Amino acid sequence: MATYAWTLTRANLIAAILRKLGVLGAGDTVQPEDSAVVAEALDARLKEMQSLGVLWWNVSGAQTSITLVAGTATATITPTDYLLPITMMLTDGTDQAPMSIISHREYQAITNKTEQGNPEQVFIDGTTCRFWPVPNANGTAKLTYQSMAADTENGAAADVPVSMIRSLTRVIAADLVDEYNPPPERAARLLAGLPDALRTLRMLKREPVDTATVAPEWF
Protein backbone atom coordinates (compact mmCIF):
# COMPACT_ATOMS: atom_id res chain seq x y z
CA MET A 1 0.00 0.00 0.00
CA ALA A 2 1.29 3.45 -0.87
CA THR A 3 2.27 5.79 1.95
CA TYR A 4 2.44 9.58 1.89
CA ALA A 5 4.09 10.07 5.27
CA TRP A 6 7.87 10.25 5.16
CA THR A 7 9.79 11.52 8.16
CA LEU A 8 13.50 11.99 8.66
CA THR A 9 14.66 12.97 12.12
CA ARG A 10 17.40 15.50 12.72
CA ALA A 11 19.76 12.59 13.41
CA ASN A 12 19.05 11.18 9.93
CA LEU A 13 19.59 14.60 8.40
CA ILE A 14 22.91 15.05 10.20
CA ALA A 15 24.12 11.67 8.97
CA ALA A 16 23.18 12.57 5.38
CA ILE A 17 25.07 15.89 5.63
CA LEU A 18 28.18 14.18 7.02
CA ARG A 19 28.07 11.61 4.21
CA LYS A 20 28.01 14.43 1.66
CA LEU A 21 31.08 15.88 3.34
CA GLY A 22 32.81 12.51 3.21
CA VAL A 23 33.10 12.40 6.99
CA LEU A 24 30.74 9.45 7.45
CA GLY A 25 30.92 6.17 5.56
CA ALA A 26 28.27 3.50 5.13
CA GLY A 27 27.59 1.82 8.46
CA ASP A 28 29.56 4.42 10.44
CA THR A 29 28.13 5.99 13.57
CA VAL A 30 27.81 9.77 13.94
CA GLN A 31 30.05 11.01 16.73
CA PRO A 32 28.53 13.37 19.33
CA GLU A 33 31.01 16.13 18.45
CA ASP A 34 30.03 16.01 14.77
CA SER A 35 26.34 15.88 15.64
CA ALA A 36 26.67 19.09 17.71
CA VAL A 37 28.55 20.92 14.93
CA VAL A 38 26.04 20.00 12.22
CA ALA A 39 23.03 20.72 14.45
CA GLU A 40 24.38 24.21 15.16
CA ALA A 41 24.87 24.89 11.45
CA LEU A 42 21.41 23.52 10.66
CA ASP A 43 19.60 25.66 13.25
CA ALA A 44 21.54 28.78 12.25
CA ARG A 45 20.69 28.30 8.57
CA LEU A 46 17.00 27.55 9.25
CA LYS A 47 16.59 30.73 11.31
CA GLU A 48 18.38 32.79 8.67
CA MET A 49 16.21 31.34 5.90
CA GLN A 50 13.05 32.05 7.86
CA SER A 51 14.09 35.66 8.44
CA LEU A 52 14.65 35.97 4.68
CA GLY A 53 11.15 34.64 4.02
CA VAL A 54 11.94 31.13 2.83
CA LEU A 55 10.04 29.32 5.58
CA TRP A 56 7.53 31.90 6.90
CA TRP A 57 4.53 29.94 5.72
CA ASN A 58 5.73 26.82 7.50
CA VAL A 59 5.48 28.38 10.98
CA SER A 60 1.97 29.01 12.25
CA GLY A 61 0.98 32.53 13.23
CA ALA A 62 1.07 32.99 17.01
CA GLN A 63 -0.92 35.51 19.04
CA THR A 64 -0.21 37.68 22.05
CA SER A 65 -2.01 40.44 23.93
CA ILE A 66 -0.48 43.88 24.35
CA THR A 67 -1.58 46.15 27.17
CA LEU A 68 -2.34 49.75 26.19
CA VAL A 69 -1.95 52.45 28.86
CA ALA A 70 -3.82 55.74 28.59
CA GLY A 71 -1.50 58.55 27.58
CA THR A 72 1.38 56.20 26.74
CA ALA A 73 2.37 55.91 23.09
CA THR A 74 4.51 52.79 23.38
CA ALA A 75 4.15 49.17 24.47
CA THR A 76 6.45 46.15 24.31
CA ILE A 77 5.99 42.84 22.51
CA THR A 78 7.03 40.30 25.13
CA PRO A 79 7.06 36.77 23.57
CA THR A 80 10.64 35.61 23.07
CA ASP A 81 9.73 33.77 19.84
CA TYR A 82 8.47 36.95 18.11
CA LEU A 83 9.89 37.45 14.62
CA LEU A 84 7.59 39.62 12.49
CA PRO A 85 4.12 41.18 12.83
CA ILE A 86 1.19 39.93 10.75
CA THR A 87 -1.86 41.84 12.02
CA MET A 88 -2.84 43.90 15.05
CA MET A 89 -6.38 44.43 16.33
CA LEU A 90 -7.66 46.88 18.93
CA THR A 91 -10.01 44.86 21.15
CA ASP A 92 -13.02 45.97 23.15
CA GLY A 93 -14.71 42.94 24.66
CA THR A 94 -15.69 40.82 21.67
CA ASP A 95 -15.35 43.74 19.23
CA GLN A 96 -12.16 44.13 17.24
CA ALA A 97 -10.94 47.00 15.08
CA PRO A 98 -7.94 46.51 12.78
CA MET A 99 -4.91 48.76 13.14
CA SER A 100 -2.65 49.53 10.19
CA ILE A 101 0.95 48.41 10.69
CA ILE A 102 2.93 51.27 9.19
CA SER A 103 6.57 51.81 8.25
CA HIS A 104 9.16 54.03 9.91
CA ARG A 105 8.77 56.57 7.10
CA GLU A 106 4.99 56.67 7.51
CA TYR A 107 5.31 57.11 11.29
CA GLN A 108 7.79 59.95 10.88
CA ALA A 109 5.35 61.68 8.51
CA ILE A 110 2.75 61.99 11.30
CA THR A 111 2.92 65.64 12.36
CA ASN A 112 1.20 65.37 15.75
CA LYS A 113 2.48 62.20 17.36
CA THR A 114 0.98 63.14 20.76
CA GLU A 115 -2.62 63.30 19.53
CA GLN A 116 -4.81 61.01 21.64
CA GLY A 117 -7.72 58.77 20.67
CA ASN A 118 -8.39 55.18 19.68
CA PRO A 119 -5.18 53.88 18.06
CA GLU A 120 -5.55 53.40 14.31
CA GLN A 121 -1.91 52.86 13.33
CA VAL A 122 1.13 51.22 14.88
CA PHE A 123 4.80 51.39 13.97
CA ILE A 124 6.70 48.36 15.28
CA ASP A 125 10.37 49.09 15.94
CA GLY A 126 11.98 45.80 16.96
CA THR A 127 9.74 44.77 19.87
CA THR A 128 8.53 48.31 20.63
CA CYS A 129 5.07 49.33 19.40
CA ARG A 130 4.44 53.05 18.80
CA PHE A 131 0.72 53.79 18.56
CA TRP A 132 -1.08 56.64 16.83
CA PRO A 133 -3.20 58.20 18.02
CA VAL A 134 -1.82 57.70 21.52
CA PRO A 135 -4.34 55.61 23.52
CA ASN A 136 -6.74 57.84 25.46
CA ALA A 137 -7.84 54.94 27.68
CA ASN A 138 -6.45 51.70 29.01
CA GLY A 139 -7.07 48.81 26.67
CA THR A 140 -5.75 45.74 24.90
CA ALA A 141 -4.44 45.01 21.42
CA LYS A 142 -4.13 41.54 19.92
CA LEU A 143 -1.04 40.92 17.81
CA THR A 144 -0.83 38.02 15.40
CA TYR A 145 2.82 37.47 14.63
CA GLN A 146 5.24 35.22 12.81
CA SER A 147 7.06 33.13 15.39
CA MET A 148 10.66 32.02 15.08
CA ALA A 149 11.36 28.47 13.99
CA ALA A 150 12.15 26.30 16.99
CA ASP A 151 15.56 24.65 17.31
CA THR A 152 15.66 21.16 15.84
CA GLU A 153 15.57 18.13 18.13
CA ASN A 154 17.58 14.98 17.55
CA GLY A 155 14.67 12.56 17.70
CA ALA A 156 12.25 14.72 15.70
CA ALA A 157 11.96 15.89 12.12
CA ALA A 158 13.23 19.36 11.22
CA ASP A 159 10.40 21.85 10.82
CA VAL A 160 10.62 21.95 7.03
CA PRO A 161 8.54 20.32 4.27
CA VAL A 162 9.78 16.94 3.07
CA SER A 163 10.27 18.44 -0.40
CA MET A 164 13.02 20.70 0.98
CA ILE A 165 15.13 17.99 2.67
CA ARG A 166 17.36 17.19 -0.31
CA SER A 167 18.27 20.81 -1.05
CA LEU A 168 18.61 21.66 2.63
CA THR A 169 21.12 18.82 3.01
CA ARG A 170 23.17 20.26 0.16
CA VAL A 171 23.09 23.74 1.70
CA ILE A 172 24.27 22.66 5.15
CA ALA A 173 27.02 20.47 3.69
CA ALA A 174 28.32 23.49 1.76
CA ASP A 175 28.10 25.62 4.91
CA LEU A 176 30.41 23.17 6.67
CA VAL A 177 33.12 22.94 4.01
CA ASP A 178 35.46 25.19 6.02
CA GLU A 179 34.72 23.24 9.21
CA TYR A 180 35.52 19.79 7.77
CA ASN A 181 37.88 20.70 4.91
CA PRO A 182 36.93 17.83 2.55
CA PRO A 183 39.14 17.00 -0.46
CA PRO A 184 39.34 19.92 -2.94
CA GLU A 185 37.21 18.26 -5.63
CA ARG A 186 34.44 17.39 -3.17
CA ALA A 187 34.58 20.87 -1.61
CA ALA A 188 34.36 22.47 -5.04
CA ARG A 189 31.28 20.39 -5.95
CA LEU A 190 29.53 21.24 -2.69
CA LEU A 191 30.21 24.98 -3.02
CA ALA A 192 29.30 25.04 -6.70
CA GLY A 193 25.93 23.43 -5.89
CA LEU A 194 25.05 25.90 -3.12
CA PRO A 195 23.42 28.61 -5.32
CA ASP A 196 21.23 26.04 -7.07
CA ALA A 197 20.18 24.47 -3.74
CA LEU A 198 19.24 27.90 -2.34
CA ARG A 199 17.24 28.75 -5.47
CA THR A 200 15.42 25.43 -5.21
CA LEU A 201 14.49 26.14 -1.58
CA ARG A 202 13.08 29.54 -2.55
CA MET A 203 11.10 27.98 -5.40
CA LEU A 204 9.71 25.25 -3.15
CA LYS A 205 8.58 27.93 -0.72
CA ARG A 206 6.34 29.60 -3.29
CA GLU A 207 2.60 29.09 -2.92
CA PRO A 208 1.25 26.79 -5.65
CA VAL A 209 -1.19 28.48 -8.02
CA ASP A 210 -3.72 27.22 -10.53
CA THR A 211 -2.08 27.00 -13.94
CA ALA A 212 -5.32 26.92 -15.94
CA THR A 213 -5.25 28.73 -19.28
CA VAL A 214 -6.45 32.33 -19.09
CA ALA A 215 -8.11 33.81 -22.18
CA PRO A 216 -6.42 37.02 -23.39
CA GLU A 217 -8.37 40.26 -23.49
CA TRP A 218 -8.33 42.16 -26.75
CA PHE A 219 -8.57 45.91 -26.81
Image (tube, rainbow, N blue to C red):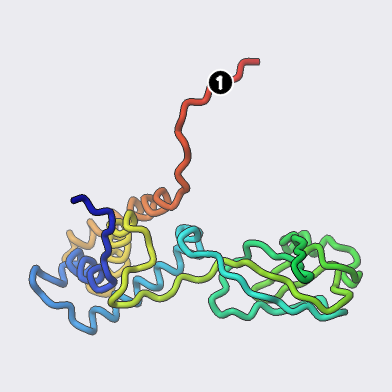
Q: How many marks?
A: 1
Say which residue label 1 marks. 216
> What residue do we see at 8% from left, 72% from top?
27
Horizontal side of 114 relative to 92 (left or right) equals right
Direction bottom: furthest residue: 32
Q: Position of residue 154 (x, y in %)?
A: 29, 77
Q: Residue at x 77, y 65 (%)?
A: 95
Q: Nearer the viewer, residue 123 or 145?
A: 145
Residue farthest to the left, as pictured: 27
Is residue 181 among what the camera can see? no
Left or right placement of residue 94 versus residue 143 in this view: right
| Amino acid at pointer 1 | Pro
| Residue at horizontal 34 percent and vertical 56 percent from the top | 164
* Residue 216 in the image, given as x and y percentages of width and height: 56, 20
**Which residue occupies the extreme top position in the image?**
219
For the C terminus, give its image quadrant.
top right
Quadrant in the picture for residue 32: bottom left
Identify the residue at image location x=61%, y=16%. Answer: 218
- Based on the displayed image, in which of its 4 quarters is residue 97 positioned? bottom right
List x then y, in percent, for residue 25.
10, 69
Q: Secondary structure at mark 1?
A: loop
| 37 lies above or below 175 | below
Q: Is residue 99 left or right of residue 42?
A: right
Comparing 56 with 139, the one in front is 139
Give x and y (percent) for residue 33: 23, 84
